[in-house]
Amino acid sequence: EAQVTQNPRYLITVTGKKLTVTCSQNMNHEYMSWYRQDPGLGLRQIYYSMNVEVTDKGDVPEGYKVSRKEKRNFPLILESPSPNQTSLYFCASSLAFGTVNTEAFFGQGTRLTVV
Amino acid sequence: ELKVEQNPLFLSMQEGKNYTIYCNYSTTSDRLYWYRQDPGKSLESLFVLLSNGAVKQEGRLMASLDTKARLSTLHITAAVHDLSATYFCAVDSNNDMRFGAGTRLTVKP
């Protein structure tokens, strides 16, 4: 089954404790991205990757890191989480960017609470 | 900077009625997407609109794109309770993907 898998689904952590949210897709998609969803703000892009070893900042990259060492995986790293990073996070992938097949497939979301 | 505005943000409608959600965007793009999100769930792709004048229909939902007006509409026909969800439009332009704030639709009996 084609899917985007995020882990964990729920996470409560303390300020400053490094964490990683994993994202994996099994569709051989080139393009992957991370979004955060906050009430009234829609989805805001954090980082995106157009292919292996190619990443770039989205709208709200501060406080986040990503890596794309393999095509299928795109982890989101919070080196020193702060309470303002409490949010619902979505990973998404699509076949490619800038072509006709840019429909995105979303993971199930990770609800992160930083206390 | 690409901006995407949806309206209304909240919509409560009776079953059987028709309504339209609007999505305006600020820069040139010919790729627009509509997604649905149920409470506590992920986003599900509804429509991909790739050219001016594109119109797509699925059941009671129809989406259209006017790239000259930088406007997409999502029209709901004879709403039913199952359509209650939040609907997002998203636009991509030059590797910049932006989502609207979403329209929370509630369909009441």
Image (cartoon, coloured by chain):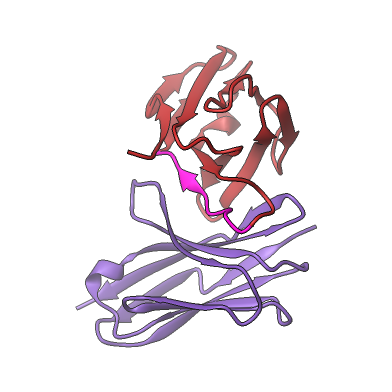
**Image-based side of A1 in relation to B93, left or right:** left
Q: Where's the N terminus of chain B, which quadrant? A: bottom right
Residue at x 24% of width, y 82% of height: B15
Magenta extent = A100-108
| Residue situated furthest top in the rendering | A17
The answer to whether residue A88 is left or right of residue A97 is left
Q: State yes or no: residue A104 in magenta.
A: yes
Q: How many marks?
A: 0
Q: In which quarter of the view is residue A51 placed?
A: top right
Residue at left offset 55%, top offset 63%? B33
Q: Indicate whether A32 appears above or below A39.
A: above
Above or below, A20 relative to B20 = above
Q: Colour of chain A?
A: red
At 30% from the left and 69% from the top, the residue drawn is B83
Whether the magenta-drawn stretch holds residue B53 is answered as no
Quarter of the image for residue B104 reads bottom left
Would residue B11 be seen by someone viewing this image from the given angle? yes
Above or below residue B109? Residue A48 is above
Judge by depth and name the residue closer to the eye, B4 or A92: A92
| Picture quadrant of residue B16 | bottom left
Q: Position of residue A33 (x, y in %)?
A: 60, 38
Quadrant holding the C terminus of chain B: bottom left
Which chain is rendered purple in the image? Answer: B
